[in-house]
Every structure is written in C-alpha cells, then in structure tokens.
C-alpha cells in the first residue's frame, strides 16, 4: 500500500512510477497514445460496434439544464463526441450506491438483451454502481473461469470497462464524516462553498462510499465479474506538490484535506484501481490531474481542451475494441 508511506508529494511520484513501470500498462498507454491522434475506426464500425453506457457519480446530475456547470457539460460532450453510440444513464447523484445499482441494472439489461456488445464507463461513485449492475446481469451466465461462454444466444458481451477515478475502495472523506460528531455541519460548510451544489442530501450518498461500505461491496461483486473483458483504470495522480496543475472545481477539496496519504482530492493512492485479479487484461493509465481528471494532462496534452478530450476518449474506446478483437 503506497498511501501515506512517503507523504503526499513523494508518494504521488512513487505511485506514477509504479504504474508506468508496469509492462502491460506501458503497452496499453503506447497503444492509446498512438491512436488518440488518428481515426482508428470508421463511422460504420462505430455505429455497428459496441454501445458505450456511462454512469456518473456523486454530484454529477445526468439531467442537463441551463444551470449545469460547464465542466460537467463539457465532460458529457467529450464522451459523446468520440463518435460511438453512447448513452448517459440516469441515476440519482445523491443516492447510496446500492440504490443506484438497482436503477442502473434496469437501464443496462436491455442493451445486453438486444445483442449489442457493451463498453461500460463509470466515473467516481458511478464506477462501483455500474459494475454491480453488470454483475447482476452477467454472473448467472459465466463459466467456472468467469468467461462469457454461456451467454444466451441473443445476449451481447461485455467488451470492456473504463474506470474513471472510481470509488473502488472508498474515500477518506466519508470515513472522516462518519467518525466526527455533528458531521452534518461539515456538509453545511461544503454546501456553503458550493462543493455539493446546494444539496445537503448528498451526505447520504457520500457515506455509502466509506471504506467499510465499499469492503462489503467488493466482497459481494468484484470476484464475479467477467474475466475475459478488458478493464482500464484512468486515475488522477498528482506528483510534486500534490496539488492540481490548474484551478478547478476540485481546488477547495485540497484546502480541506484530512487524508493521511497522497490522494487525488477524494481517494488515496492506489485505491481508485480495480483489483488486478479480476482479469488478465487489466490496465492503468495515469493522468497528471486530480479526481476530476479534466483539470490535468495526458502526457503533454491538456485535458482542459475539448479537442484533446475528444481524441482521448476516441482513442480509449478504439483501443479497447481493437485489443478485444486483435490483442496487442
């Protein structure tokens, strides 16, 4: 465990080095880097290829309104502009993970039953929620090696899963809030600073992603996911000072940060990664940014720029599809 071992700044550097020195991660990153700058799939391939289903997390309301912050709207557009058929799934951004899991299962199941192959994307709290939904749908049809060999004839396959700063192990913030008497005052403070967008009920959803709660989740779901899908962790890793490279919506979280170890603003390293025993094709890509990711850089490319984000997601989805079909 790297969290807290060296202190915030150095631990971020160590974690980034660990990720990039892994041979499989390096190969996938090279694959992604090369393909993010070119059209690797035709429009016909995209239209007939896997459908991309996206679940957002705490604070990311999937209902776009004129009041939706620009950083949320831009993220939505970048996912959709990758050119694949995609769907932003509807969840309650303030609900506990177990509630949203059931809501997502009802939305995801028809896509698998239609025969379309699927790529799932989960951001923040949406990462465990959509994984649990997939587990409920697919686990009855997996063989003893957890491969998708027993699916009904009309079922599509899970091709890949993209974990964007996922709450896989939980967040120190939920732990701290649950331990502090009168923690609701902390929620009031966050609400006053526009960190919860005026919704105090988010405390309920936040408490559902404590380490204690997520340990229960992992024990129930993570060892039953398909082993023949491709899993990609996109994690924000802050090196040097441990602060985001530019001011963003995450900035206040670094002013009020009680984590004991290096972190992305919400999650201590390396707790945003899925366990590597889920599947042999498990890759992690480090972005120099916070939990938000889009306040950072992929290599020397700023994810704050729309064109870069569009190319990044185009390359990411394309890399998963090509690796699934051809390997690399």
Image (cartoon, helix red, strand yellow):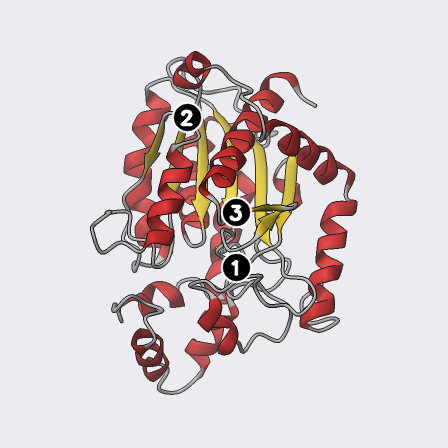
Find disc 3 in the rendering and name its residue: 303
**Mark pair 1, 2: CA separation:** 36 Å
Find disc 2 in the rendering and name its residue: 83
**Mark pair 3, 2: CA separation:** 18 Å
Mark count: 3
The answer to whether marks 3 and 2 mark residues whose Cβ atoms lie closer than 8 Å is no
- Residue 82 x, y percent position in the rendering: 44, 30
The residue lying toward the viewer, choosing from 72 and 305, is: 305
Give the left or right position of residue 22, taking residue 279 as reference.
right
The answer to whether marks 1 and 2 mark residues whose Cβ atoms lie closer than 8 Å is no
The structure residue drawn at horizontal position 65% and vertical position 39%, both measured from the top left corner, is: 283
**Quarter of the figure with the C terminus:** top right
Find disc 1 in the rendering and name its residue: 215
Position of residue 256 relative to residue 152, above or below, is below
Secondary element at image label 1: helix
**Label 2 neighbour load within 10 Å: few <14, some 14-19, many 20+:** some
Position of residue 274 relative to residue 281, above or below, is below
Q: Which of label 1 and label 3 is nearer to you?
A: 3
Position of residue 212 relative to residue 191, above or below, is above
Secondary element at image label 3: loop
The structure residue drawn at horizontal position 37% and vertical position 48%, both measured from the top left corner, is: 56
Which badge, 1 or 2, comes first in the chain's sequence? 2
- Residue 84 x, y percent position in the rendering: 41, 25
Secondary element at image label 2: loop
**Mark pair 1, 3: CA separation:** 32 Å
- Residue 144 x, y percent position in the rendering: 59, 29
Give the left or right position of residue 62, taking residue 148 as reference.
left
């Amino acid at each position: 465990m790297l969290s807290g071992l060296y202190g915030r700044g150095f631990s971020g550097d160590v974690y980034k080095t660990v990720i990039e020195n892994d041979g499989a991660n390096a190969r996938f990153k090279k694959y992604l880097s090369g393909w993010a700058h070119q059209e690797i799939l035709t429009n016909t391939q995209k239209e007939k290829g896997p459908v991309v289903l996206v679940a957002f997390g705490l604070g990311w309301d999937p209902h776009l309104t004129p009041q939706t912050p620009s950083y949320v709207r831009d993220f939505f557009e970048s996912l959709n502009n990758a050119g694949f058929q995609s769907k932003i799934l509807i969840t309650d951004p303030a609900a506990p993970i177990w509630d949203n899991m059931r809501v997502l299962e009802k939305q995801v199941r028809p896509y698998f039953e239609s025969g379309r192959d699927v790529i799932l994307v989960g951001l923040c709290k949406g990462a465990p929620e959509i994984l649990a939904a997939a587990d409920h749908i697919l686990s009855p049809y997996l063989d003893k090696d957890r491969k998708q060999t027993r699916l009904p004839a009309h079922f599509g396959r899970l091709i890949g899963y993209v974990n964007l700063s996922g709450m896989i192990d939980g967040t120190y913030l939920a732990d701290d809030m649950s331990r502090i008497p009168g923690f609701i005052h902390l929620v009031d403070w966050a609400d006053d600073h526009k960190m919860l967008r005026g919704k105090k009920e988010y405390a309920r959803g936040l408490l559902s992603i404590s380490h204690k709660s997520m340990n229960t989740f992992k024990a129930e779901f993570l060892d039953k996911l398909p082993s023949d899908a491709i899993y990609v962790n996109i994690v924000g890793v802050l090196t040097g000072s441990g602060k985001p490279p530019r001011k963003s919506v995450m900035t206040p979280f670094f002013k009020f940060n009680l984590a004991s170890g290096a972190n992305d603003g919400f999650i201590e390293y390396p707790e945003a990664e899925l366990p590597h025993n889920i599947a042999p094709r498990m890759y992690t890509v480090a972005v120099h940014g916070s939990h938000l990711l889009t306040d950072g850089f992929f290599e020397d490319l700023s994810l704050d720029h729309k064109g870069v984000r569009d190319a990044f997601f185009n390359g990411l989805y394309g890399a998963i599809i090509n690796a699934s079909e051809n390997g690399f």
